[in-house]
Image (tube, rainbow, N blue to C red):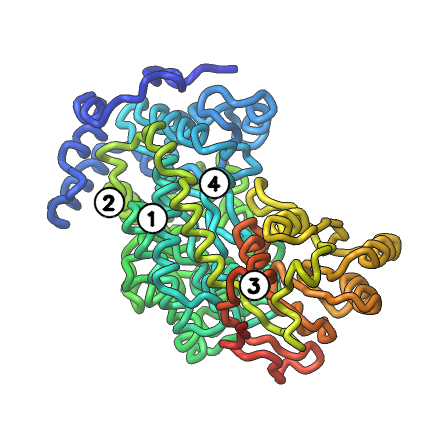
Amino acid sequence: MTGSPPGTPPEGAHVPSRRTVLAAGAGLTTAVATAFTLGGTAHADADRRLRALISRMTLEEKVGQVFVTRVYGHSATAPDQADAEANLAELGVRTAAELIARYRVGGIIYFTWAHNTRDPLQIADLSNGLQRASLGQPRGLPVLVSTDQEHGIVARVGEPATLFPGAMAIGAGGSRADARALGRVAGGELRAMGVRQDYSPVVDVNVNPANPVIGVRSFGADPEAVAELAAAEIRGYRAAGVAATAKHFPGHGDTAVDSHYGFPVITHTREVWEKLDAVPFRAAIAAGVDSIMTAHILVPALDDSGDPATLSRPVVTGLLREKLGYDGVVVTDALDMAGVRTKYGDDRVPVLALKAGVDQLLNPPKLDVAWNAVLRAVRDGELTEARLEESVLRILRLKDRLGLLADPYVSRDRVGRTVGTKAHLATADGIAERTTTLLVNEGALLPLSPRTHRRLLVVGADPASPSGTTGPPTGVLAAALTELGFTATALSTGTAPSAETIARAVTAAGEADAVVVGTYNVSATSPQKALVGQLLATGRPVVAVAVRNPYDVAQLPSVKAYLASYSWTDAELRAAARVIAGAVGPRGRLPVPVQRPDDPASVLYPIGHGLGY
């Protein structure tokens, strides 16, 4: 395994203090950091100094600044052998330090599957290792570390970090104070680990129940409510010193195709876009959002060229920059997704994105191809160096506002004082209690009492943990109910239970006083319907919890008590258990309408529906 770049201390070395960094005389970073204190200077003076910094960068360094890439491994210099080999196969280097030295990238994105996020202290050490590697280069600049920590069903950093309910749960709670608290606490924990840019919140208005990629990642179907909650969360992140990212512009909420695997087309008119999709983005901009992510979707009413929004100058520059007046950082959605690769090759996509007006190129499938394509486009005159420098300036403005140019390092001590504290966990639990929604309660079946229904069987789907550190859902529910005085037994039946599995569940139900079943994205043909039907036939009371989409309730109209938790992380499931037991009352209200499955024009449960005790 090759070593780190010359002048880069080993990863376990002492992290320089802020004073040491400022006095290091390491070229451009020192010159800029001296000028930019945490309090900042006048905007014009700041830009003047940043432009002076850019004028001393090489073209290759400027190209590097606009790229944000994955890299495998828990360490910047000493990844596990398998991760080093994965880096070599995909990126042509063995370590993150080597990647930074070769491409001078401006950003790194953390993923669980890339083994970047084992635990909070390791994440902080990795972040410091990336900064040392970058600052050790000639004219070295700090790296902007990012991740997708939306909470709910998308979370890259798991326990012991604090995990909050997802956006649709927050929508069900309807509290701007809770949304802001989420941003403040979650942002503070990310910053303590060296992550300064979070690709959250999702501000898409989810008006399509069949949306396979947004769904519960959205605050809901009411654009004004989405706007209010998104703005509050963004303000929370900003207060924590972390860049929030509103996504996915111009609006991904009415798709039936997942842009990871296909090319969605949205048929909204310009008028519908103005009244629906644009509303939360306007609110995000007014709240000072630091970055906005583009969508790999086609909206013919906004640009009929056939290009995805990520590559569309009318959308990125015409709408976002000029009409909405946004001059912050625009980041692409991941460039390895199918939605942006259907029309152009991987060498054209990054160039066209920059020409459209974006600033950060996120996770290209082949970094060498993308990096060299941008370099070649500038050298050949297709992309002017002045245009490239516009993006570099926006990126450096953001790094400065986040304090990276003054002090890019994090303290291990602060990790212990900040991440997953009792106060933060209590905040998450309290928010979750205010989001659980009671959709159906015929005959006042809920709440259950241990005096009358002591023996509970908990069955249902056990989808993999969003963060890799929670669940399984049936086990979490059973444990929480047992703590509340019941004797609860868990039996995982999966998302597609077989006849044998259903029979086993029915037999177990015969020994229980009531059954709690977790449902997951139930369709008209889902075997989960057969499971619930046969459980109901036993005569035992059945309580259902939709652990993802609240639309499940429409497929199971015979269930007498139905709750929506909007996700299956531990905080949401524990809150659902407390509602089932009556330890707290249900307070959530549907942020989306639930329609009849056989007649989408007919609404079974409108926005705002939610029962109490």
Counting from the top left corner in percent of width and height, residue 555 is at 71, 72
Label 4 crowd bin: few (<14), some (14–19), many (20+), radius 10 Å: many
Q: Hey, which residue is sitting farthest front in the picture? A: 451
Residue annotated with mark 4:
370
Q: CA distance from mark 1 to mark 4?
A: 25 Å
Real-space CA distance between mark 2 and mark 3, rounded to the nearest whole angstrom: 46 Å
Q: Residue at x 36, y 67 (%)?
A: 228
Q: Which mark is residue 401?
A: 2
Callout in the foreground (1, 4): 1
| Eye-nearest disc, 2 or 3 | 3
Name which quarter of the figure residue 113 lies in.
top right
Q: Residue furthest bottom?
A: 602
Is 288 rendered above or below residue 117? below
Quick check: 358 left or right of 564?
A: left
The percent coordinates of residue 265 (x first, y second) are 56, 67
Would you call the spot at circle 2 few (<14 residues within 10 Å), some (14-19), or many (20 or more)?
A: many
Report how far apart the C-alphas of labels 3 and 4 lie in the structure.
56 Å
Amino acid type at circle 1 is: Ala
> In terms of depth relative to the viewer, which is nearer, 426 or 592?
426
Tell which tag, 2 or 4, sits nearer the viewer.
Answer: 2
- From the image, tell me which residue sits under label 3: 582
